[in-house]
Amino acid sequence: MPTYIIERDVPGADKLTGDDLCAISAKSNDTVAGLGVPYKWITSYVAGDKLYCVHEAPSADDIRRHAERGGFPVSSITEVSAVIGPWTATEK
Protein backbone atom coordinates (compact mmCIF):
# COMPACT_ATOMS: atom_id res chain seq x y z
CA MET A 1 0.00 0.00 0.00
CA PRO A 2 1.40 3.45 -0.84
CA THR A 3 2.72 5.70 1.91
CA TYR A 4 1.90 9.41 1.90
CA ILE A 5 3.15 12.48 3.74
CA ILE A 6 0.36 14.93 4.47
CA GLU A 7 1.22 18.52 5.30
CA ARG A 8 -1.42 20.28 7.41
CA ASP A 9 -1.39 24.00 8.25
CA VAL A 10 -2.54 24.29 11.86
CA PRO A 11 -1.80 27.74 13.32
CA GLY A 12 -0.47 27.31 16.84
CA ALA A 13 0.08 23.58 16.41
CA ASP A 14 3.20 23.73 18.55
CA LYS A 15 1.07 25.13 21.39
CA LEU A 16 -1.49 22.29 21.36
CA THR A 17 -1.87 20.65 24.76
CA GLY A 18 -1.68 16.96 25.48
CA ASP A 19 -5.48 16.94 25.73
CA ASP A 20 -5.76 18.67 22.33
CA LEU A 21 -3.44 16.11 20.74
CA CYS A 22 -5.37 13.28 22.38
CA ALA A 23 -8.66 14.60 20.95
CA ILE A 24 -7.16 15.02 17.46
CA SER A 25 -5.75 11.49 17.62
CA ALA A 26 -9.06 10.01 18.74
CA LYS A 27 -10.91 11.83 15.93
CA SER A 28 -8.40 10.51 13.38
CA ASN A 29 -8.68 6.95 14.71
CA ASP A 30 -12.49 7.09 14.57
CA THR A 31 -12.38 8.48 11.04
CA VAL A 32 -9.95 5.77 9.88
CA ALA A 33 -12.24 3.09 11.34
CA GLY A 34 -15.17 4.40 9.31
CA LEU A 35 -13.46 4.70 5.93
CA GLY A 36 -14.13 1.14 4.83
CA VAL A 37 -10.76 0.75 3.11
CA PRO A 38 -7.36 -0.44 4.33
CA TYR A 39 -5.85 2.67 5.92
CA LYS A 40 -3.10 3.09 8.49
CA TRP A 41 -2.01 6.20 10.31
CA ILE A 42 1.70 5.67 10.97
CA THR A 43 2.74 8.82 12.86
CA SER A 44 2.51 12.60 12.88
CA TYR A 45 5.04 15.31 13.67
CA VAL A 46 4.05 18.64 15.20
CA ALA A 47 6.42 21.38 14.02
CA GLY A 48 5.69 25.08 14.31
CA ASP A 49 2.33 25.82 12.70
CA LYS A 50 2.19 22.51 10.85
CA LEU A 51 1.49 18.84 11.28
CA TYR A 52 3.31 16.37 9.04
CA CYS A 53 1.44 13.09 8.99
CA VAL A 54 2.55 9.75 7.57
CA HIS A 55 -0.29 7.51 6.42
CA GLU A 56 -0.63 4.37 4.32
CA ALA A 57 -3.70 4.32 2.08
CA PRO A 58 -4.80 2.88 -1.25
CA SER A 59 -4.85 6.35 -2.87
CA ALA A 60 -4.48 10.08 -2.32
CA ASP A 61 -8.28 10.29 -2.71
CA ASP A 62 -8.60 8.15 0.43
CA ILE A 63 -6.28 10.56 2.25
CA ARG A 64 -8.52 13.46 1.16
CA ARG A 65 -11.63 11.56 2.28
CA HIS A 66 -10.07 10.98 5.72
CA ALA A 67 -9.30 14.70 5.97
CA GLU A 68 -12.78 15.80 4.87
CA ARG A 69 -14.61 13.39 7.18
CA GLY A 70 -12.37 14.22 10.13
CA GLY A 71 -12.32 17.96 9.54
CA PHE A 72 -8.55 18.00 9.14
CA PRO A 73 -6.84 20.61 6.93
CA VAL A 74 -4.69 19.43 4.03
CA SER A 75 -2.08 21.66 2.41
CA SER A 76 -0.39 18.93 0.40
CA ILE A 77 -0.35 15.17 -0.11
CA THR A 78 2.84 13.60 -1.43
CA GLU A 79 3.37 9.92 -2.16
CA VAL A 80 6.63 8.59 -0.73
CA SER A 81 8.86 7.18 -3.48
CA ALA A 82 11.67 5.87 -1.25
CA VAL A 83 12.75 5.71 2.38
CA ILE A 84 16.39 6.28 3.28
CA GLY A 85 18.34 6.55 6.50
CA PRO A 86 21.79 5.83 7.91
CA TRP A 87 21.41 2.18 6.89
CA THR A 88 21.10 3.19 3.23
CA ALA A 89 24.83 3.98 3.10
CA THR A 90 25.69 0.31 3.57
CA GLU A 91 23.02 -1.23 1.33
CA LYS A 92 23.76 -2.11 -2.27
Image: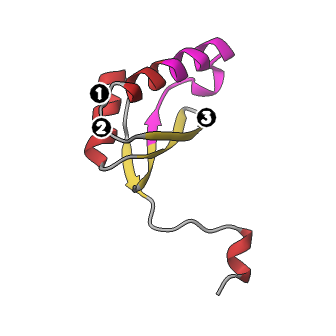
Q: Earlier in the sequence, mark 3 or mark 1?
A: 3
- Give the amino acid type for the residue marked by disc 2 in the picture: Arg
Q: Is residue 72 visible?
A: no
Element marked by disc 1: helix
- Give the amino acid type for the residue marked by disc 3 in the picture: Gly
Q: Is residue 41 left or right of residue 19?
A: left
Residue at 73%, 82% in the rendered image: 90
State the separation of the CA atoms marked 3 and 1: 23 Å
- Give the amino acid type for the residue marked by disc 1 in the picture: Glu
Residue at 35%, 30% in the rendered image: 67
Q: Which mark is residue 48?
A: 3
Prevailing secondary structure of the magenta residues: helix
Disc 3 versus disc 1: nearer the observer? 1
**Residue 83 in the image, given as x and y percentages of width and height:** 56, 65
Q: Magenta includes 79?
A: no
- Magenta-drawn segment: 7-26
For label 1, the residue is 68
**Residue 17 in the image, given as x and y percentages of width and height:** 66, 15
Crowd rating for badge 3 (residues with CA inside 10 Å; few <14, some 14–19, many 20+): few
Q: Earlier in the sequence, mark 2 or mark 3?
A: 3
Name the image quarter holding the N terminus: bottom left
Name the image quarter holding the C terminus: bottom right
Q: Is residue 48 visible?
A: yes
Residue at the extreme bottom: 92
Residue at 64%, 27% in the rendered image: 14
Crowd rating for badge 2 (residues with CA inside 10 Å; few <14, some 14–19, many 20+): some
Pick the front one: 71 or 30: 30
Element marked by disc 3: loop
**Residue 59 in the image, given as x and y percentages of width and height:** 30, 50
Q: Is residue 9 left or right of residue 18?
A: left
For label 2, the residue is 64
- Tell me if label 2 and label 1 are in contact, CB under 8 Å: yes
